[in-house]
Amino acid sequence: MSGIEVLAGVSIPYQQDKDSKKWVGTVGHNWQVTSKPVVDFAAEAERKIRKKVKSHGKFSYPLKPKTLPSELEKHLSNETEIPFYDFVNKIHLHSGISLNSSRVQSKLVLIFLKYKKATARHTEELPDYRSFFLVMLLKDKSALKFDDDGSPNGTNIIDFEDVMQAAIFSIDEFQNTLSNQEPPDVSFINGATKYFIDFLDAEEVIKNQESVKNLLTALENYGSQLSLRRVEREKCEAKVKGFLDENERKGFPTKLQDVSTIMYNALRENAQLEVERDSFEDFIRENSYKINDEFTISKADREQLEFISFDTDVGNLKLKKSLIKSKGVDGSIIFNQNTGELIIKTKVSDQEVKAQLKKIQYDDDANQNF
């Protein structure tokens, strides 16, 4: 069972004019949402598109009239008066894809899909779904197996060689963000071009620093979801930091897929966790963390995996997490959560520092003689 329920689907074939070479959309086709091939298509899109997004941006805000996000807002606010098919046709009429040329020899098809998927918390007694909106531009080759009415009639049809462009976003987050008067998020597969981004009226592809911040948050929350013991959490953080440090030395960007593999290798010995190679990456997709496929991490950000830094009345402290004492874990740093007191037991070996400390003590003793 795919756990997918298709709410609406429309496809618009595009054909290339022989003289102008421009691509022109034809008549839209409404999909039969309960047919098995349509549901299978949505399940494939969920598996191959939503879980493989590469970069993230935002819709322009305030929403501009007659754009995809503004018309979608109208459709969602009153679906009975503005059916999905009418919404898509209006977008096609006023804001259709402007594609002047392409080396594609066959037809193209633009697909709009609205579906909902059961979450991990879903039960028959307490149903829990998340809704998504997907738009993709496909090469319409014979292998795609579309009926004359535009609906898919085969299951093994989404090949990344056939997907020219694709974007996806959570409908729930889209509506919640708009209610807060903020720009909604939208995610793209790798290689999204200007004409496709313009078609969605999107902008501000997520910056590297935001990717890094979201990655660090995801690592912490992933450990919480798995109920990792402290020793397991610190093992993961050390493995990830070592990998990031190596990439920095070699001048390589970090790939999200590689971080997921590092996490898997660190945890796979614990059979009770039942983690798979892509478990961390799946966790990120399922929880919609905005993390680009590739990013670079500064030394300060990498050190957050190993150290905790904060200001106190005695100065700024940078403490190694693994040295903090807790139940079952020895350490030279003791924190009393009831009183807020922090006790650090350490030994100074640097001769210059020892000399400075001694001088401070000597000056203090000398002053007391007066």
Image: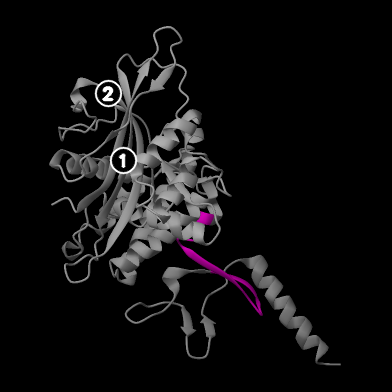
Specify whether residue 292 is in view: no
Q: Position of residue 238 (x, y in %)?
A: 39, 58
Is residue 235 toward the left or the right of residue 127 in the image? right
Q: Is residue 305 magenta?
A: yes
Q: Looking at numbered disc 1 in the image, what kind of residue is underneath it? A: Ile
Q: Nearer the viewer, residue 99 or 297?
A: 99
Label 1 element class: loop
Q: Position of residue 95 (x, y in %)?
A: 48, 33
Residue displayed at 22% across by 51% down: 5
Q: Is residue 13 magenta?
A: no
Mark 1, residue position: 49
**Which residue of the protein is positioned furthest toward the top in this rendering?**
19
Q: Position of residue 250 (x, y in %)?
A: 46, 38
| Number of the label disc, if any, that sits on residue 366 | none
Total tally of numbered discs in the picture: 2
Specify whether residue 342 is in view: yes
Label 2 element class: strand
Q: Is residue 180 above or below residue 255?
A: below
Disc 2 packing (10 Å; few <14; some 14–19; many ≥20): many
Residue displayed at 49% across by 33% down: 94
Please state, as top left, top right, bottom left or bottom right, where the C terminus lies in the image: bottom right
Residue displayed at 42% across by 44% down: 187
- Indicate which label's residue lies in the foreground, 2 or 1: 2
Q: Is residue 44 above or below residue 241?
A: above
Is residue 47 toward the left or the right of residue 293 in the image? left
Mark 2, residue position: 140
Is residue 123 toward the left or the right of residue 239 in the image? left
Is residue 21 toward the left or the right of residue 228 in the image? right
Q: Position of residue 348 (x, y in %)?
A: 57, 72
Q: Looking at numbered disc 2 in the image, what kind of residue is underneath it? A: Asp
Nearer the N terminus, badge 2 or badge 1? 1
Q: Which residues are magenta?
A: 301-318
